[in-house]
Image (cartoon, rainbow, N blue to C red):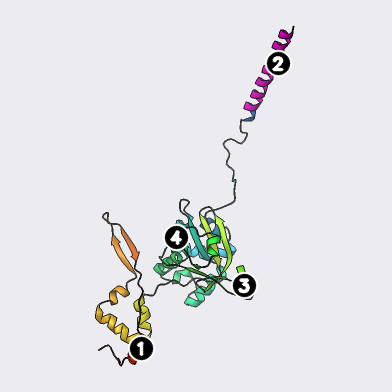
């Protein structure tokens, strides 16, 4: 009798297990199969900027003009973008004496965007260490972070990039990098060492020495043009450090001209 009850009990348990398995299989049929849903709200960098036209519509126009919109939206790349808001861009146009980006040389605008773009992620933690950033901009320059004070006080309200643009928003996350919002457009380093020599009369003797030495062309050429075996053209930035002697120092040694 005990053996019969045991068989009946096992039979009942097996039926229950089968019933549960059938229920699970039915439950595994996704009622939303074939439909697409957005499971997060993060966007790639340029698309995010475009989602806030009241703040960034003017920089979006500049990105398009510089042919950089798709580049900073690329999913397989990681960027850190320093983005001036609309008010900052308007002030930049006034400073440049133009009313829109179309009045600026396209090559200059491209260098401007590259100067505001780093092809690596600079986290908020690293950014707030201050000093020279660890990665160069796409233009090959290094930006620096400093801390000061303004009408809102110090701390996070007074973080500056290159000492000329205050950070209004820190490290906005996008799917392909971070965005730091600025209240001014950064000034790209487009002048060469020779330009700096030429514009300052205190260095006229040294400038003439540079001319006589044959170094003028080197110091006045910011990029080398490099051709690959396949004929592809690329540009490599040339960086120098020039230790300049002023006319006043020459005069102390009795030197009044290059001769």
Give whichever of discs 4 and 2 has the lower sequence position: 2
Quadrant position of residue 139: bottom left
Is residue 7 part of the magenta span, yes or no? yes
- Horizontal and vertical percent position of residue 114: 44, 64
Q: Secondary structure at mark 1?
A: helix
Give the quarter of the figure containing the N terminus. top right
Residue 148's disc number:
none
Mark 1 → mark 3, Cα distance in angstroms: 40 Å
In the image, residue 42 sits, relative to residue 37, either above or below, namely below
Q: Residues within 10 Å of mark 3 (few under 14, many from 20)?
A: few
Q: Nearer the viewer, residue 202 or 222?
A: 202
Q: Residues within 10 Å of mark 2 (few under 14, many from 20)?
A: few
Q: Which residues are drawn in magenta?
A: 1-25
Q: Which type of secondary structure does the marked residue at label 4 adopt? A: loop
**Residue at coordinates 50% horizontally, 62% vertically from top-left?**
81
Q: Earlier in the sequence, mark 2 or mark 3?
A: 2
User: Mark 3 highlights which residue?
Assistant: 154
Residue contact at pointers 2 and 3, CB within 8 angstroms: no
Q: Nearer the viewer, residue 126 or 96?
A: 126
Of tags 4 and 3, the one toward the viewer is: 3
**Structural distance between the alpha carbons of marks 4 and 3:** 34 Å
Label 2 – label 1 distance at C-alpha: 105 Å
Q: Residue 68: which disc?
A: 4
Choose the circle earlier in sequence order: 1 or 3. Answer: 3
- Looking at the rendered structure, which numbered label has been put on residue 12? 2
Give the label on residue 249, or none.
1
| Mark closest to the chain's N terminus, 4 or 1 | 4
Left or right of 41? Residue 200 is: left
Estimate the spatial distance between the alpha carbons at disc 4 and disc 2, rounded to whole Å: 69 Å
Instruction: Kindly indicate whether the residue at mark 3 contacts the one at mark 1 (C-beta within 8 angstroms).
Output: no
Label whose residue precedes the other's in the sequence (2 or 1): 2
Q: Residue at x 58, y 63 (%)?
A: 170
């Amino acid at each position: 009798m005990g053996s019969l009850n045991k068989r009946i009990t096992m039979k009942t348990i097996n039926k229950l297990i089968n019933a549960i398995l059938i229920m699970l299989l039915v439950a595994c049929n996704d009622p939303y199969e074939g439909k697409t849903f957005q499971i997060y709200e993060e966007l790639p960098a340029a698309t995010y900027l475009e989602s806030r036209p009241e703040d960034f519509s003017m920089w979006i126009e500049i990105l398009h003009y510089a042919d950089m919109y798709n580049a900073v939206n690329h999913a397989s790349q990681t960027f850190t973008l320093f983005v001036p808001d609309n008010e900052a861009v308007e002030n930049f146009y006034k400073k440049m004496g133009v009313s829109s980006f179309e009045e600026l040389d396209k090559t200059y605008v491209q260098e401007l965007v590259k100067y505001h773009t780093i092809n690596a992620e600079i986290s908020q933690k690293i950014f707030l260490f201050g000093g020279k950033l660890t990665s160069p901009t796409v233009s090959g320059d290094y930006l620096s972070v400093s801390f000061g004070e303004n009408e809102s006080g110090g701390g996070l309200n007074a973080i500056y990039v290159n000492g000329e643009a205050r950070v209004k928003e820190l490290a906005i996350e996008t799917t392909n990098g971070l965005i730091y919002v600025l209240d001014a457009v950064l000034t790209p380093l487009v002048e060469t060492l020779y330009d700096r020599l030429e514009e300052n009369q205190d260095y006229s003797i040294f400038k003439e020495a540079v001319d006589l030495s044959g170094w003028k062309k080197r110091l006045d050429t910011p990029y080398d043009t490099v051709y690959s075996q396949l004929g592809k053209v690329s540009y490599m930035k040339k960086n120098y450090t020039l230790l300049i002697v002023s006319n006043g120092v020459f005069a102390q040694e009795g030197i009044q001209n290059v001769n």
